[in-house]
Amino acid sequence: MEKLGRILKTVFLALMLMVVMCMHVQAQPRISEIPTFIYLQLTPNPVGVNQQVYVIVFFSNPPPTAGGLGYGITPGDRYENVTVHITRPDGTKEMLGPAISDAVGGLYFTYVPNQVGTYVFRAVYPGEILDGKSSVQPIPGPTGRSLWGAKMLPSTSDPVTLVVQQEPVRGYVSPPLPNEYWTRPIYATNYEWAKLGGSWYGLRAPAFAWTGMYDAMGNFNPYSPAPNTPHILWTKPTHFGGQPGLPIEASTESNFMTTSILVYYFEPIILNGILYYTKLAGPTSIVQGWEAVDLHTGQVLWSKPAGKTGGEVLRMGQILKYHSIQEFGCWTFLWGMPKPAVFAAPAWFAVYDAYTGTFLANITNVVSTNFIVDTESRYPGSLLAWYVRAGRLYKWNSTRLMMNKSFDMITIRPTGTYDWSAGIEWSVPIPTTYQGASISLSVAAVTPKVVLLRYSPPLETWLQFNQGWQITVGVDAKTGAVLWGPKNQTLPYLHAVFFVAAKEDAYVLLDKDTFEAYGYSLLNGEKIWGPVKLQCNAMSHIWVSGDIAYGKVFIWDYGGYVNCLDLKTGQLLWTFTRGSAGYDTPYGTYMLWGYGTHSIADGKLFLFEGKMYDPPMCPNLRLLALNVEDGSLVWNILFHGGRSPAAVADSMLVAWNCYDAQIYCFGKGPTETTVTATPEVITEGGSVLIKGTVMDISPGTKQNGVVERFPKGLPAAADGDMKAWMEYVYMQQPRPDKVEGVKVKLYAINEKGTSVYIGETTTDPLNGGIFSFSWSPQQPGTYTITALFEGSESYWRSYSSTAVTVTPAPPPAPASATPQHGS
């Protein structure tokens, strides 16, 4: 449907331009009647019964007083009350419409025929009197005022027949999802492959950071697959990491500094399979530049000065889908800003082309806020923000801002300087008093449907306990209308009540002192469940964090507990903990870090163990991947989380490790399978030895520290042993005593094309990834032998072939006569 709309707009624009070029320059007498010409096109034609048909109606000229070329509700007349009359094969009739055209004289309907046979369609326009207005825009426009009062004459299209057949009409079928290694770009007609992609926008900053979170609602990426094993594709250092060596004695606090909350290290943004981050240096986080890295290969695509000023940091990324009569498709932008001081807001943003890093435009007088991606409007990918200033709630739209300098809203061309206010979609007053007392509502959470405003001041700035109440208001995120509130609700007096998350029509609070959770409706503000007691230990009360996804709320804490509750009922669904930490930490628990450093994607909750601020840097901490349905551990690997979340995009996960100050990219890797058969020529009845290897050829296998240890290649390993294998290969951990290999299936095809299944064998990673199999062909001939590794959760498939010839066995030698001896 979108494609047809774009074609129509192109046709109508061309027609309009032709009309403009053909206009006479000299003065014309006043026009009282204007002929019209209406046309109708059906597609597809023929079509199968019960399949959808597009009924395209257009006029030879745009409405003569229509103002504007864009999709907006522009002034001027339209062709009104257009109908399509249909005669079915059985002689019965029906009508589509009435409907109104757009500014260039086009419209369309959809229709599903339910009878086999021939249909007849006619489009009818009844005519009208021009007055510069339309039913969708009652305010008259400035175009064609001399024609007001003229009569647009009726017109009827020629009849068009539609042939409906029993057999369905087949359209283009997108290629299925790949079972082999793939890279960007995704071919434009591979629509299914879009499920492999996804982005990580950085639309919100974790605590003490500039960017790195998915969006204003949290770190849930609902679109991208995520790794099911800790297979490492590549690593890349950003700073000195690990132990410096003597004379500085090695200990849990002698590592190169990677856990300070005052130093910026790495904050990810991912667009179109490219990882972007600001390069930073030294104790004061001096901005060195920006880097763009291919997520699939680890290759640096470009490394440039940090924006136009040379001192900017990356704030967020954006992919905008824009559709007008002039053009359609997606643009990709990076947003930069001046490096702010701690807790300070930026004064301006700058917009850059993400492919090259080229400067495009400035935005001044910006407001410090968080953003979400608009997926419901005419321009998917627009950045939306809501914020409070001076007793008013504002909604801001990046596309509205960028169209501010666009000719009649038909292109997106960010250029020059914009004022932030040009992107304001609306502002509405919000309550500033409640029952005579002054209140100061702020945005507690945003969702595509509801903006939650909340006021619950602590007694002092740095004290978390509240005064025993909260005042909340729910506002329609699209219109600004107050949905409910203000509501004054009681909270546990002088308790530390923590706002966990808001999403999916609910928000959740946690009493950190009693470790009880409460659920509230975003649709009416009422409490829907709670208190619900969560499992915890003493350390759990120090810090908690959480997010919402898949109809569940996840709450994790400094004591190492993860509690999952049903968002609608508050039922405790599961609890996860790694148990006692022994001597690994001073606290007896494996601390789960918060501050927005988690990730949720593809049915998995990714959490870092670790902590910031003070020593020690505890050993044996992990990056955890939990199954959101039952809390089971999907995978884990030796890892100390930092101050930014693991970013999930393009089926990969990117995270920064405090243990060695390196970026790690996890995901499925490409493989190479080899096979030989010896001897190549055998005699019928003999055996051939089939042997070969399956190697991991991910980019990291060629990087320093790996290629020297595995000069003949890195063998592939089974998913179940991936943690120990990757820790050995990339993290300098001990070589495992036992590592299971991958399964290889062997096939043979004879000269007639008949396939024979030979058998299955397993590689041996600790002995070069080799596999072997002895086979005795049953028939003479030449065979093509194929070794197939079907892939796993860690690797993509690969195969290789060789050949062997089997010659007929020679006939048996005749038996010699036995001599007879006389008596």
Image: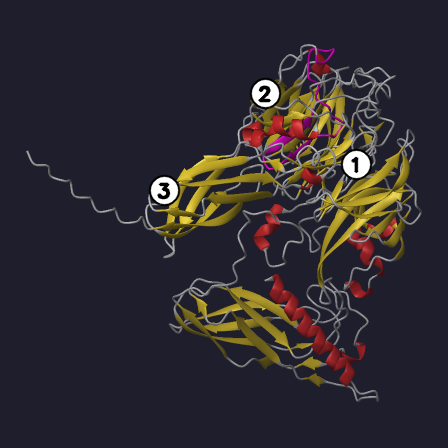
Q: In which quadrant of the rendered view does residue 560 lie?
A: top right
Give the residue type at disc 3: Gly
Prevailing secondary structure class for the magenta stretch in the rendered image: loop
Residue at horizontal 75%, vertical 22%? 469
Q: Residue 400, can we see it?
A: yes
Give the residue number, with chain letter if any, for mark 1.
Answer: 267
Q: Nearer the viewer, mark 1 or mark 3?
A: 3
Residue 605 located within the stretch drawn in magenta: yes
Residue nearer the viewer, 445 or 256 = 256
Give the residue number, with chain letter if any, for mark 3.
Answer: 686
* Among the two numbered marks 2 and 1 on one chain, the one whose residue lies closer to the N terminus: 1
Image coordinates of residue 777 in percent, x first then y, are 36, 45
Residue range highlighted in magenta: 584-608
Q: Are marks 1 and 3 in contact (CB under 8 Å)?
A: no
Residue at horizontal 46%, vertical 50%? 803
Q: Residue 339, can we see it?
A: no
